[in-house]
Structures are given as structure tokens and as C-alpha cells.
Amino acid sequence: MEINTNLSEKAKHDYMLVRRAIAGDQRAYAELMERYRDAIYYMLLKMVNNASDAEDLTIEAFGKAFKNITQYAPNYAFSTWLFKIATNNCIDFIRKKKANHVSLDHTNEEHERATKDIQAPIPDPEETLINNQKMKLMRSLVSKLKPRYRKLIELRYFSELSYEEIAEELELPIGTVKAQLFRARELLFNILRHTSGKM
């Protein structure tokens, strides 16, 4: 597919990285992540107003983008495509969170702006399929972690326990739980980089 000549130099460079990534160049995945990780994180942080959730959603956004990277078409910038994936995934997250409970302590304007246009929380069959595929992908990635990191990820993301609940469950200080979860996220990023090209 020919590259759109209207793309900026930055977008053209991104497209070259995408092509290298699809061809199996793991460094290209790493560079794409390096270029956009902070921007994605801070955008998501504004949407959810919670650093831990923003970190989780950043991982999910890159995981989803790398898994579907062959679907990217260069008629628009890779960053546009990536930010749309991250935004849509975040809206799904907020929708699910709103469906589970109405929070009384998140009444700031940014949160209201992020959630006011969200539709009914019941996912359609396509969303359910995508979510199931996402969970299957995440479980396969998590299975490659060392046991202690695998346990932490499972409790945090699959059982949806809070940091406090995880600390109690594993009899660890909450600071240790947060530090090890941060390390586990880093390891997941590395696994994503090394497996995405083979999916």
C-alpha cells in the first residue's frame, strides 16, 4: 500500500516503523511505544483521573494496537489510529465502571465530560467478542510471567482487586504490591513487543 504523501514527516516515519514491525522487527515496536507511551498515558489520565487506571489502560491500548497493527492503513497518521484505539478502550472502561457502581467521589468536570455522552452499558455481541479476544490475549501474555508477577496481574486485572486487597491477600506491604505491579507491567510491555509480530 502506498503511503499518503500528505502525511507529516513524523507520520511517514511512524509508517516506516509500522512496516518494520509487521515484518517482525521488535525494535520497531519498541520505538513506536517509546514515541507515544507518555502521550497516551497522560491523555488517559485526563479521562479517568486515576494514575493506576491510566497505566493499565496504556498497556491495553498498545496491546490492542500491536495485535491489530496489520489493520492500520497509511491514509492517516499512525498516531491518530493509536489514540482512537486508546480513547475507545478507555470509554469502554468508563462505561463498565459506571455500570458497576456510581462513584460519589469523582465529581470533577473532567470526569463528567469524559462520561456524560456514554450510552447504555450493555455491550453488543461484537463488543463481547472483542472483549473475550482481548482477555484471551492478556491471559496468554500473563502466563509467560514469573509466578509472583503472574499472581499479582491476575489479582489486579482478572479478579479486579484493589491494591489494599492484594496486599492483604498476599500478606505484603502495599508499597511492595505497587512496586511489583509496576515491574509486572514493564515485563508485560516487553512480552508484547516480542510476541506481537508473531500473532
Image: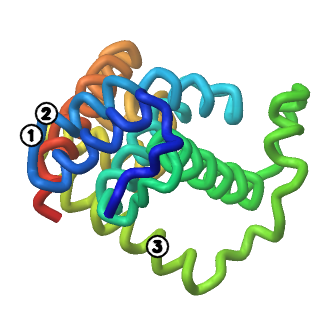
Relative to 86, residue 167 above or below:
above
What residue does disc 3 label? Answer: 130
Task: Pick the quarter of the image with the C terminus.
Answer: bottom left
Residue plotted at (81% across, 70% down)? 120
SS at badge 3: helix
Work out whether residue 164 or residue 153 is closer to the camera in this orientation and state it. 153
Q: Residues within 10 Å of mark 3 (few under 14, many from 20)?
A: few
Give the Cα distance between marks 1 and 3: 27 Å
- Furthest-front residue in view? 5
Secondary element under disc 1, as helix, strand or loop, is: loop
Mark 1 or 3: the one toward you: 3
* Residue 184 or residue 199, whichever sits in front: 199
User: In the figure, residue 125 lies in which quadrant?
Assistant: bottom right
Residue 180: x, y in percent?
Answer: 26, 23
The quarter in which the N terminus is drawn is: bottom left
Q: Which residue is tagged 1?
A: 146
In this rendering, which labeled residue sits more in front, label 3 or label 2?
A: 2
Amino acid type for the residue under numbered disc 3? Ile
- Please name the amino acid that badge 1 sits on: Lys
- 3 and 2 marks in contact (CB < 8 Å): no
Image depth: mark 2 or mark 1 in front: 2
- x, y (%) of residue 41? 51, 27
Choose the circle earlier in sequence order: 3 or 2. 2
Q: Residue at x 47, y 80 (%)?
A: 129
The answer to whether residue 102 is visible is yes
Instruction: Choose the circle earlier in sequence order: 2 or 1.
Output: 2
Q: Position of residue 143 (x, y in %)?
A: 15, 55
Crowding at dot 1, Cα within 10 Å, few <14 / some 14-19 / many 20+, comes out as: few
Amino acid identity at mark 2 = Arg
Earlier sequence position, callout 1 versus callout 3: 3
- Identify the residue under disc 2: 27
